Amino acid sequence: MSCLPSNRSTGTSGAATFTTSSLTSGSHAISAAYQGSANHHPATSAPIAQTINKTVTTTTLAATPNPGIAGKNVVRTAAVKNSAGTATTHGSVTLRLDATG
């Protein structure tokens, strides 16, 4: 079990909030633990299931030069970006000759 860095004060509302973008895709069980105070006993919530979906990606392919010349090198560049348009830096790309999908 790992802990989210969340030592948050409940403040006057009695509620603490925590925001993170560090969860990986998949299902995560998250609970909250109150350490108690001089006047209150500690308590822990039941866990909730938090599902994080994978980010949608797009892949584009370019060839230089295009058209190529028989017997000469042609460079193919595949670019993978997430839905925000940021380059995806993990994973691998497979290039296929005469592929249809």
Image (spheres, grey):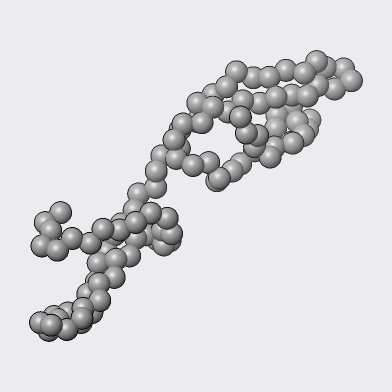
Residue 85 vertical placement versus 26 (above, below): below
Depth check: give the residue in front, 49 or 75. Answer: 75
| Location of residue 44 by image quarter | top right
Residue 84 visible? The answer is: no
> Which residue is drawn at the image coordinates 58% and 28% (left, top)?
30
Q: How many marks?
A: 0
Residue 87 visible? The answer is: yes
Q: Position of residue 73 (x, y in %)?
A: 20, 81
Residue at the right extreme of this rendering? 38
> Which residue is drawn at the image coordinates 53% and 41% (left, top)?
23
Q: Position of residue 96 (x, y in %)?
A: 18, 60
| Location of residue 89 by image quarter | bottom left
Q: Position of residue 31 (x, y in %)?
A: 61, 25
Residue 13 vertical placement versus 73 (above, below): above
Q: Quadrant of the N terminus?
A: top right
Depth check: give the residue in front, 92 or 60. Answer: 92
> Which residue is drawn at the image coordinates 27% and 64% (left, top)?
60
Residue 38 vertical placement versus 60 (above, below): above
